[in-house]
Image (cartoon, rainbow, N blue to C red):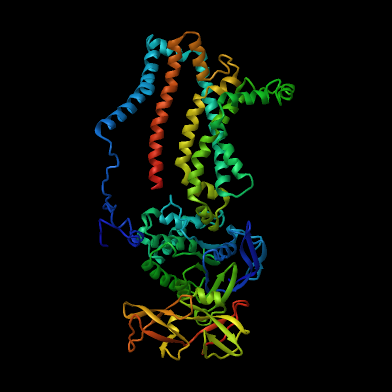
């Protein structure tokens, strides 16, 4: 096969067997300077961007850890092993696990329905998926108070049957779910749209059942995007403050999640303790960031 | 397996994809569904496969209605336009898929699956690439994997949706011959959808020309080319020149000159003359039914062609005619053309024709 650096025709590309040649065959693009700004302009822009980033993100992050350890390591450990703190951490983990699991299920179902089927109300569903992004979390929380509160729609009935939702775990999970619902579906929809339905059709035509098709064909194709969605969903679920704050009731050791616990400690002037718990959330953010970058690389390689 | 399609109709919203289509497909034949895009050919194929269901009509396999069978139970080998290979599986696993997803009691032991897939890969000449992933293969190789995967389940019928559409001309040609050889060997009933007439005419035993959600003509490749049933088929298959003529008391008039024709003519009035460029002979400009001026002369390989503008008043009608070796023409020459074989269709009633001379 003749190698023409300047131009590779479509025929050649079609016939091109990547197994034959692993040597670089990519067309060398002529380097064109897009930026024509003078040096000092570029310098100002770069410095401004980096300066803003360090001032508003890196500096506060350092401050969190500095404050957390300001009263020494033992105070830090004490703050984290305090029974109320431990309860808040446990609750946060439970809530995050529950809401991520449920959203995983609903997110995949919604993405599946939207990308693989035609049905009335599809556009409405696509719009509704984005609703939690556009509604203030506090409003989302109030929504559940209106629904389950004693003066609310279902409140009296629930009270009669002795079912506790508001100011208890169920409401916290529901509020968190509401706020984090879009993450999984949002990640999956564009990918599944791009992949189309022909691989699934092929699987079914070869005799695979619906479940086998999902497990053997669909799931492997979306797994990285799914993990990405779970990651973002989890980060948001653990950090959610507004919606949870409205529905939790702030019962210490019972319905306080980590963000709520931090607020209480802060309001009680226990700065070191507040920042100690905050440092846990900050570390979660850092871990999320690293995993997110790794997953993004995987996703990019997939789509190549 | 023979397949009978009985009065099938299908619409998508307001778009009518198939209008009362009936067709019989004999066991073991290689049939091509040929038509322009939007003619309903892919819809018909998907209905045969059970990927779509008709709004009206029935599909019968060996005389038994398949209305209650979906694509999973129809046991068809479907090859998709863009292959639809499982991108996260190796070539081997792709081909083995249909064998592995069988219910446990029907599933063959691993040994046998391995042997079978190995044989299939040998058959499609891809044994050396068994461990590759689809994105490491060329288009032609992917197509062969898709075929092997469909053949693995020993399908009752092989359905191919524009199988060579995404390949370049050279690979397409060789794969076409390969498919024909494969069919000669396996004798599995095969239906091929294509918009490429060359492909349909070369590969298939029988060609179904589709247009406007209907079947326009069914016949052998020779019949389709030599005896097009109506103006649509004449226009769609091969090169053709379409000229307005007038039929009047047993004579066909091209402008003011008569054209000798036999057989039954359409009713008097305006009609359309269809002729293939290679059926035009150069003749005396003064007496020939068609005359015009040579605009340009081109040579393509061994043959020379003349672009001729026919005299048709204000209308522009260009004809590309092959120049005979013994009669060279130059741009500007006035020439006469006599159609040796042609057809006349009544534009209002459609497929009325008179046999060629």
Q: What is the quadrant of residue A61 in the picture?
A: top left
Q: What is the quadrant of residue A301 in the picture?
A: top left
Q: What is the quadrant of residue B174 in the picture?
A: bottom left
Q: Nearer the viewer, residue B276 or B145?
A: B276
Residue B187 x/y as whole percent: 50, 73
Residue A79 x/y as whole percent: 45, 12
The answer to whether any part of residue B133 appears in the image is no
Q: How many marks?
A: 0
Q: Nearer the viewer, residue B323 or A201?
A: B323
Q: Is residue A219 above or below residue A247?
A: below
Q: Is residue B282 above or below residue A144?
A: below
Please indicate whether residue A125 sits to the left or right of residue A16 in the image. Answer: right
Residue A56 x/y as whole percent: 38, 22
Please indicate whether residue B350 sits to the left or right of residue B235 in the image. Answer: right
Q: Residue furthest front?
A: B314
Residue A37 x/y as whole percent: 28, 36
Residue ID at (51%, 68%): B192
Residue ID at (47%, 77%): B240
Q: Is residue B278 above or below residue B71?
A: below
Q: Nearer the viewer, residue A200 or B82?
A: B82
Quadrant that contains the N terminus of chain B: bottom right
The answer to whether any part of residue A52 appears in the image is yes
Please indicate whether residue A30 sits to the left or right of residue A142 in the image. Answer: left
């Amino acid at each position: 096969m003749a190698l023409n650096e300047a131009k590779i025709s479509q025929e050649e590309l079609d016939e091109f067997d990547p197994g034959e040649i692993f040597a670089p065959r990519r067309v060398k693009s002529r380097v064109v300077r897009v930026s024509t700004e003078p040096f000092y302009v570029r310098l100002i822009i770069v410095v401004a961007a980096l300066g803003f980033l360090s001032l508003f993100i890196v500096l506060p992050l350092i401050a969190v850890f500095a404050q957390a350890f300001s009263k020494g390591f033992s105070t830090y450990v004490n703050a984290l092993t305090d029974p109320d703190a431990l309860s808040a951490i446990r609750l946060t983990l439970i809530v995050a696990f529950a809401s991520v699991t449920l959203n995983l299920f609903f997110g995949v179902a919604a993405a599946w329905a939207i990308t693989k089927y035609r049905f009335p109300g599809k556009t409405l569903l696509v719009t509704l998926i984005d609703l939690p992004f556009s509604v203030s979390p506090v409003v989302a929380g109030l929504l559940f108070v209106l629904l389950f509160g004693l003066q609310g729609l279902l409140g009296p009935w629930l009270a009669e049957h002795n079912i506790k939702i508001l100011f208890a775990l169920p409401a916290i999970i529901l509020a968190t779910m509401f706020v984090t619902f879009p993450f999984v579906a949002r990640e999956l929809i564009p990918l599944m749209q791009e992949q189309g339905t022909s691989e699934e059709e092929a699987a079914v035509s070869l005799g695979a059942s619906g479940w086998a098709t999902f497990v053997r064909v669909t799931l492997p194709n979306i797994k990285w995007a799914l993990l990405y969605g779970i990651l973002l969903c989890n980060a948001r679920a653990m950090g959610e403050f507004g919606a949870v704050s409205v529905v939790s009731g702030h019962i210490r050791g019972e319905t306080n999640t980590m963000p709520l616990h931090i607020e209480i400690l802060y309001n009680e002037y226990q700065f070191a303790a507040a920042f100690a718990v905050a440092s846990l959330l900050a570390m979660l953010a850092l871990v999320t960031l690293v995993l997110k970058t790794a997953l993004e690389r995987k996703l990019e390689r997939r789509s190549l | 397996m023979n397949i009978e399609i009985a009065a099938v109709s299908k619409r998508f919203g307001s778009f009518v994809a198939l209008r009362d289509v009936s067709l019989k497909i004999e066991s073991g034949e290689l049939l091509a569904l040929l038509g322009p895009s939007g003619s309903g050919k892919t819809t018909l194929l998907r209905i045969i496969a059970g990927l779509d269901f008709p709004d009206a009509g029935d599909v019968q396999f060996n005389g038994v209605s398949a209305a209650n069978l979906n694509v999973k139970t129809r046991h068809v080998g479907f090859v998709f336009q863009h292959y639809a290979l499982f991108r996260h599986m190796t070539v081997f696993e792709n081909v083995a898929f249909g064998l592995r997803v069988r219910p446990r009691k029907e599933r063959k032991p691993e040994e046998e699956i391995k042997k079978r897939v190995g044989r299939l890969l040998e058959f499609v000449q891809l044994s050396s690439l068994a461990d590759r992933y689809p994105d490491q293969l060329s288009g032609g190789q992917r197509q062969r994997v898709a075929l092997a995967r469909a053949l693995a389940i020993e399908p009752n019928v092989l359905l191919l949706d524009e199988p060579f559409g995404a390949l370049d001309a050279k690979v397409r040609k060789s794969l076409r011959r390969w498919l024909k050889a494969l069919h000669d060997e396996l004798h599995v009933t095969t239906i091929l959808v294509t918009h490429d007439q060359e492909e349909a005419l070369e590969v298939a035993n029988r060609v179904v020309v589709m247009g406007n959600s209907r079947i326009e003509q069914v016949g052998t490749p020779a019949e389709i080319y030599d005896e097009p049933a109506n103006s649509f088929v004449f226009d769609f298959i091969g090169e053709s020149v379409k000229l307005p003529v007038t039929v009047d008391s047993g004579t066909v008039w091209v402008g003011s000159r008569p054209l000798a024709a036999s057989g039954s003519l359409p009713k008097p009035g305006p009609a359309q003359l269809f002729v293939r460029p290679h059926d035009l002979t150069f003749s005396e400009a003064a007496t020939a039914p068609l005359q015009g001026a040579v605009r340009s002369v081109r040579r393509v390989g061994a043959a020379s062609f003349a672009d001729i503008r026919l005299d048709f008043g204000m209308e522009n009608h260009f004809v590309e005619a092959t120049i005979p070796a013994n009669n060279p023409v130059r741009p500007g020459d006035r020439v006469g053309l006599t159609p040796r074989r042609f057809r006349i269709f009544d534009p209002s009633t459609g497929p009325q024709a008179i046999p060629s001379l």
